Image (cartoon, rainbow, N blue to C red):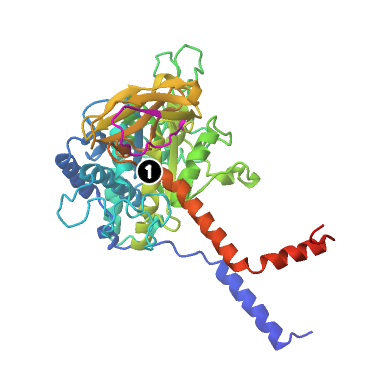
Amino acid sequence: MSMVPGTMKVVLLIAGLLLLSSVPAPAAAVDSSYLDLYMGYDQMVDEIFEMANAHPEIVMVVSIGVTYEGRDIWAVKVSDNVAEDEDEPEVLITSVHHAKEWPGLEVTMATLRQLVNGYSNGCCDLDEDGFLDGDDDKDGVSDEDPYNGIDDDADGQVDEDWSQDRIAWLVDNREIWIVPVLNPDGLEYCRQQVANWVTSESELWRKNREPNYQDLGGLQGLTYGVDLNRNYGFHWGELGAQSYANSGAEDYIGPLDKTDDDGDRRINEDKMDNMDNDGDGLIDEDGRGGFTALETRAIKALVEEHEVTIAHHMHTFKGTIYWPWMFTLQLPEDEDTFMRIAVEMNVLNGYGYRDMSDRNQQTYSRHPPVDGDSNDWMYGKHDIISYTIELGYNMFIPGEEEMAEIVLANLGANLVAIEEADHPRRPPVTLDHVPLDNTSSTDGREVIVRVGGGELVPGGLAVHYRVDGGEFQREVMMADMGRGGYAADLPGVPEGSVVEYYFVAQSAAQGTSFLPSYGPYQVFSYTVGEESSSGSSVVVLPLLLIILAAIGVAFVYRRRLPDLASNGLRKLGLRRGV
């Protein structure tokens, strides 16, 4: 039986498509022009020290360790009173765990610039260019397009003109630690590869560059490096998902521990899981492995010297937000918290995240199985709400257009993490207040605030006020059951004065809340000696519209009303005069 020519063509076409589909897709490629597009280690170092020299009041640079090749691992702290260890929530942002994941450095440095420049410039035209320093898109308006994932000013750009009030508030109320390059040896080696025309991303370097001398003399010869994000010592190596036998693999997690750390003539009997496995009263003192790399030890020391509450680790690429647990399908105790904050970040970067209401995500497909990653150690050992942000969708090192989109999309996500640091496990208490209008009276005035969503600590609600730009004064507010909230009195002031005020609430379980959100950069205010017309206009304007509408109806129907009434009576079976 022979095929007709048309059928034969269809069969050949399908066969050709199947053959093409079986051919592996070409590996993603980079070229030497990317060396100018992306920042290197030395450029990063120069910039962070320039920032510290220009803004020593809010920027401090410290070395948290030295790599095998002698490069410092620099951490940048941003905070007001930066040299002091204040009682403020602490945040950690890292990037370049993996040498060939360059966009993370761009995102962390852009975040650093926004914090430093936004705080330092304030609301003034310091460079005398005719625009306020908060007017980033030079349209004559400041702060009109903040980070919220929306094109607020309808200019075709999203989040390009961020709120300086928010930036300044974050710097004043947080201690922010940024490690732009955790793996400088690997990064510079990877950049050398690109300079030497290694263009395939699959061939680019991922690990650090410390020699694996424990394998010297093996069949594979001397190998280099461990995967830093598989080298954290929490349930290290238990899953067997990554390489611990082949030190040449790019996901090599490091060697097994061969040291009797607690002197009991046993090794590896008390693994890093936050439990006393050997029942000797000590916890995790003789682990199986992990923290063999100088870089992960540096992060370990930084975290253990501080009280970090939330962490972001920048990687590429998946367009995904990951959080613990990574070594098991078991959900963390704080799953709802992780989900809530991930939703906030998703609004800004659009990245996916696991949603356990979707049964398809209740398998390993929700994340790759991982041994010894940063999230599990930080959360499991130190109770830190820790995220991995897989930046971008297409490449480890994307081109200029996608890289710019990645930076813009994730600046806001980092600000979310910094803001959430005070109360990551619960949303803050809510405050509700009707702002005071201008007044002609010079007498004192009462302010009322309603509180919801949490229990305040004793004396935990205060109004901060100032007169004519002076120093802010603090007045504790007292519960007032008659008014259904908390009340305080603001003092009388002379005619012509301007009074500014904001509220601060402190809850033991939910941290600190401000109203307006970023006081004292945002405040309520009123002027004494000027009667406000806003209250009366709210009533008068709608009333005036109603009167005008009534007049219009009367005008249109003034001649038809008698006929309409007569028709209505007739339909009801009634007559005039009855």
Which of the 4 quarters of the picture holds residue 556? bottom right
Q: In the image shown, does 241 or 160 lie closer to the viewer? A: 160
Q: In which quarter of the image is the N terminus?
A: bottom right
The total number of labels drawn is 1
Residue 283 in picture, x, y percent from top left: 45, 18
Q: Which residue lies furthest to the top in this view?
A: 280
Left or right: 257 in relation to 358? left
Identify the residue shown where x is 82% and y is 57%. Answer: 578
Quadrant of residue 14 in the image?
bottom right
Can the viewer see residue 318 in this picture?
A: no
Counting from the top left corner in percent of width and height, residue 442 is at 28, 31
Question: Seen in the image, is 54 located left or right of residue 466?
Answer: left
Nearest to the observer: residue 8 or residue 103: 103
Kind of residue at disc 1:
Asn
Other residues around mark 1 within 10 Å, as few (<14) / some (14–19) / many (≥20):
many
Can residue 483 be seen here?
yes
Q: What secondary structure is the magenta-colored segment mainly?
A: loop
Instruction: Locate residue 293, reporting x and y percent.
Output: 34, 34
Q: As drawn, which residue projects farthest toward the front?
A: 577
Residue farthest bottom in this picture: 5
**Closest to the observer, 511 or 472:** 472
At 29% from the left and 41% from the top, the residue drawn is 530
Q: Give the range drawn in magenta.
A: 428-447
109 horizontally vs 128: left or right: right
Tell me the SS state at disc 1: helix
In magenta stretch: residue 440: yes
Residue 145 belongs to magenta span = no
Give x and y (percent) for residue 165.
31, 42
- Report which residue position mark 1 lands on: 414
